[in-house]
């Protein structure tokens, strides 16, 4: 059970008690503000870094597309030449068999 203490407290004493209760809060809020300022600076640096990385990724993507465009005709030419080589190898094997020098 709680004990009730009847005390007559003047308005002045009450004001002092309330003020003492809030004493030190300003310092705490200043510390918190300082921390938030530091976090804001860190986020600003992070945003800058992400922006730089994004630009570099876009540059790399453009360069890669240029390489892909340059390789596309080469790949098509390679496929055509590969088919021709297979046809020529088949014809050589037939001629070697007819000549009797075929590899077994």
Image (cartoon, grey):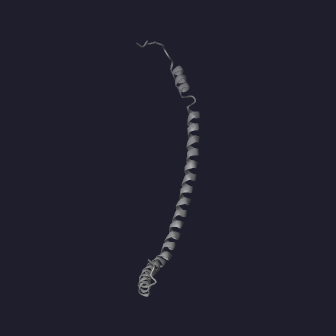
- Quarter of the image with the C terminus in it: bottom left
Q: Is residue 74 above or below residue 8?
A: below
Asked whether 66 or 38 is in front, the reply is: 66
User: Which residue corresponds to the image point at 58% horizontal and 37% vertical from the top-left?
Assistant: 31
Asked whether 37 or 78 is in front, the reply is: 78
Q: Is residue 7 left or right of residue 34?
A: left
Q: Give x and y (percent) for residue 7.
A: 48, 13
Asked whether 59 or 7 is in front, the reply is: 59
Asked whether 48 or 97 is in front, the reply is: 97
User: Which residue corresponds to the image point at 44% horizontal and 85% vertical from the top-left?
Assistant: 100
Residue 96 placement: quadrant: bottom left
Q: Give x and y (percent) for residue 55.
A: 54, 63
- Quarter of the image with the N terminus in it: top left
Q: Is residue 58 above or below residue 19?
A: below
User: Which residue corresponds to the image point at 43% horizontal and 86% vertical from the top-left?
Assistant: 95
Q: Give x and y (percent) for residue 73.
A: 47, 79
Total numbered badges shown on the rendered structure? 0
Q: Give x and y (percent) for residue 69.
A: 48, 75
Q: Is residue 50 above or below residue 58?
A: above
Q: Is residue 93 above or below residue 8?
A: below
């Amino acid at each position: 059970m709680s004990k009730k203490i009847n005390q007559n407290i003047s308005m002045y004493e009450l004001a002092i008690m309330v003020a003492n209760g809030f004493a030190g809060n300003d310092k705490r809020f200043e510390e918190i503000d300082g921390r938030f300022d530091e976090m804001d600076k860190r986020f600003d640096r992070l945003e800058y870094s992400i922006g730089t990385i994004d630009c570099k990724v876009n540059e790399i993507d453009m360069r890669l597309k240029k390489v892909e465009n340059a390789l596309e005709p080469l790949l098509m030419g390679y496929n055509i030449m590969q088919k021709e080589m297979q046809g020529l190898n088949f014809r050589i094997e037939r001629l070697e068999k007819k000549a009797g020098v075929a590899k077994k």
